[in-house]
Amino acid sequence: MVINLGIKRRSKKLLDRINESRTTQLFILTSLLQAILVIALEVRVYRRNEDTSRSVIVYGRRISSSAACLEPSLLRLNNIIEENVIFIIFQIFQMWLCFNAIYNQNTIQIITIAAANFFCASFGIIQMLEVQKWYKDFGKTCQIPLEIDFNPSFSSLDIPLVVVLMIFGFIMAFLSWKLYRQFGWNIYKKIGGDIQKQAMFRTYLIYVMLLKLDLFFILGLALEACTVFKINLRVKPTSIKHIRYLPKPFYLFHIAVSGLIFLNQIIGYRSVKKEMKLGIIYVCVFWVVIIIDFGILLYYSIGSVKDSWYFFIIFLIVGIIMTLLSLIWSVFVYKNFGQGLQDHLDQKNKESSANNNNLLLVSNEKRWSIED
């Protein structure tokens, strides 16, 4: 019963926030349209790459005597396919961020979403260049020149994706600017004119936003690394299949860290909500552990230049930067504990809750009078 009431209350709050203005409605509608269109276009790119991968495997069977030389090309193409899947997952994650930003009226998160759209458009261009480079480098490791019938169809697959991402990027940037002004006024009403409290609240919003982004850039990266790397007991890699390997102690260390990342996210969120200093200290220590773990992964990811998976290396670097930012903002929110911000927010939440309860009582009284 209590759970159902909580779900109903949150659902009502979300609907109220979505319908608060024409801008909030357009923002949510645009985020839904973007997710549907971009995922549909990316699935087409994914299918092209998947079909090409199957063609390479079939081609390798026909030239079985020298098929081993195709392994580098096949491995790189499979990396590109994994990028397509990660990109699709990110679009779903970004749509959740949009709903969450409206629900919490987080101005910092709104700005980040606008920037993320242009980042996605840049990735679409990089994705196209990667496929182009793969085709040019196909079969170069073989002793005899090899060719494969490959039509990338950039004009009908990749370019429309980039154009759609750019269009949505500008639309979301405009809507984000309008929401920043709207939510800025709401924050002023909630926090008041105290400049110091506004600065502390902004720090709080950035920290909470980083925790949400960490779900993809840290937890998602850690899980991806579990599939990318394998335990290798050899002193040195012996073939193309062992380019990305980890010694057993480091692999087990990464598995342990990956298992604790989500718990760290929960502790980090609860600690800042309740101003738990011990919890934030634990979180800071664990951020350092994650940086060490990602540093090890980065070291073992950088092989020879031609064999490196550039996307994964960039993903790791972004993950390290995100972890470092989370560590820095953990220190910032720790320093703000006991400065009165949480008491102020709790008081405002109590007033809001009391108003909601009064509305609920009025609604119940009306219903009972009708039933009588």
Image (cartoon, grey):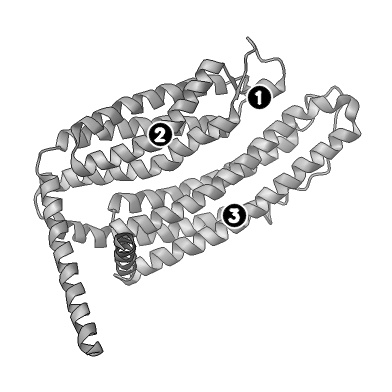
Position of 341 with respect to 111 (left or right) is left
Query: Residue drawn at (56%, 43%), measured in percent from left and top?
Result: 86
Residue picked out by circle 3? 161
Q: Is residue 4 above or below residue 358?
A: above
- In the rendered image, residue 308, in percent from the top left (x then y), is placed at 61, 26
Sequence-first tag of 1 and 3: 3
Q: Is residue 183 above or below residue 251?
A: below
Calculate the distance from the C-alpha at mark 2 to the C-alpha at mark 3.
Answer: 33 Å
Identify the amino acid type marked 3: Leu
Calculate the distance from the C-alpha at mark 1 to the C-alpha at mark 3.
Answer: 27 Å
Secondary structure beneath dot 2 equals helix
- State the image quarter where residue 371 is shown: bottom left
Residue picked out by circle 2? 261
Residue 125 visible from this viewpoint = no
Sequence-first tag of 2 and 3: 3
Secondary structure beneath dot 3 equals helix
Asked whether disc 1 touches disc 3, contact meaning CB atoms under 8 Å apart, the reply is no
Position of 200 with respect to 23 (left or right) is left
Query: Residue drawn at (79%, 44%), measured in percent from left and top?
Result: 150
Residue picked out by circle 1? 306
Q: Residues within 10 Å of mark 3 (few under 14, many from 20)?
A: many
Position of 312 with respect to 317 (left or right) is right
Residue 33 visible from this viewpoint = yes
Q: Nearer the viewer, residue 208 or 33?
A: 208
Secondary structure beneath dot 1 equals helix
Q: Is residue 233 above or below residue 40?
A: above
Q: Quadrant of the C terminus?
A: bottom left
Asked whether disc 2 touches disc 3, contact meaning CB atoms under 8 Å apart, the reply is no
Identify the amino acid type marked 2: Ile
Identify the amino acid type marked 1: Lys
- In the rendered image, residue 139, in percent from the top left (x then y), is placed at 79, 30
Q: Nearer the viewer, residue 314 or 272?
A: 272
